[in-house]
Image: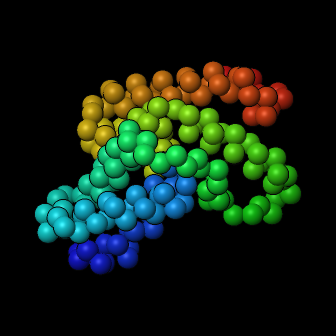
Amino acid sequence: MSFDDYVRLRGERLVRLARVLVRDRYLAEDLVQEVLGKAYARWDRISRVDDPDMYLRRMLVNSHISWRRKRSSSEVATDIPSFYPDRTDGADIGTETAERDAAWRLIADLPPKQRTTLVLRYYEDLDDATIARIMRCSPVTVRTQAMRALATLRARLAGTPALNRKGDTRR
């Protein structure tokens, strides 16, 4: 597959993944553009690996972590991705939007590796072994990161009344 074909077929998915990681559409596009620029220079080698998607996801995650470490940007993301179409089931869209916003803020406050683990597991629907290869760690580390992230979210959720629904006894 040529680089142009890959970008045409898979580029949007990379942008969606980046949007979930960085929570800002424009920074996500910049991040993907940077990753694709690096990939273009090595495309002959990348296209020969078993799974170019995993390779580019790894590049994206690594670039995101490097970007977070640099902290060169003083911008604060305030726009929440609108991945969900309007609902027609009669549910209050304002309440759902507020709850989703609060949940994304809780996720955004997680350390980068924990947030990346949750995004790859629940948004990208990847298994622990694949996540481990992307993050270059063991599957046990992936499970530990996910367990810690979920424990942190549960603890923070307990202190966020907007997300606590009456009658919800799960904790």
Find residue 48 and report its horizontal and vertical position in percent: 14, 64
Q: Is residue 22 left or right of residue 1?
A: right
Q: Residue at x 31, y 78 (%)?
A: 5
Instruction: Check the image and report above or below for 114 versus 22.
Output: above
Task: Tell me if I can see residue 113 in this picture.
Answer: yes
Q: Residue at x 77, y 61 (%)?
A: 87
> How many callouts does the rendering have?
0
Find residue 37 and report its horizontal and vertical position in percent: 28, 66
Q: Quadrant of the C terminus?
A: top right
Q: Write down the quadrant of residue 70 in the picture.
A: top left
Q: Is residue 136 left or right of residue 148?
A: left
**Frontmost residue, 42 versus 91:** 42
Q: Residue at x 17, y 64 (%)?
A: 42
Q: Quadrant of the N terminus?
A: bottom left
Q: Residue at x 69, y 45 (%)?
A: 101
Find residue 125 and report its horizontal and vertical position in percent: 45, 48
Find residue 52 and report its horizontal and vertical position in percent: 25, 60
Task: Tell me if I can see residue 123 in this picture.
Answer: no
**Frontmost residue, 82 versus 120:** 82
Instruction: Check the image and report above or below for 163 versus 3.
Output: above
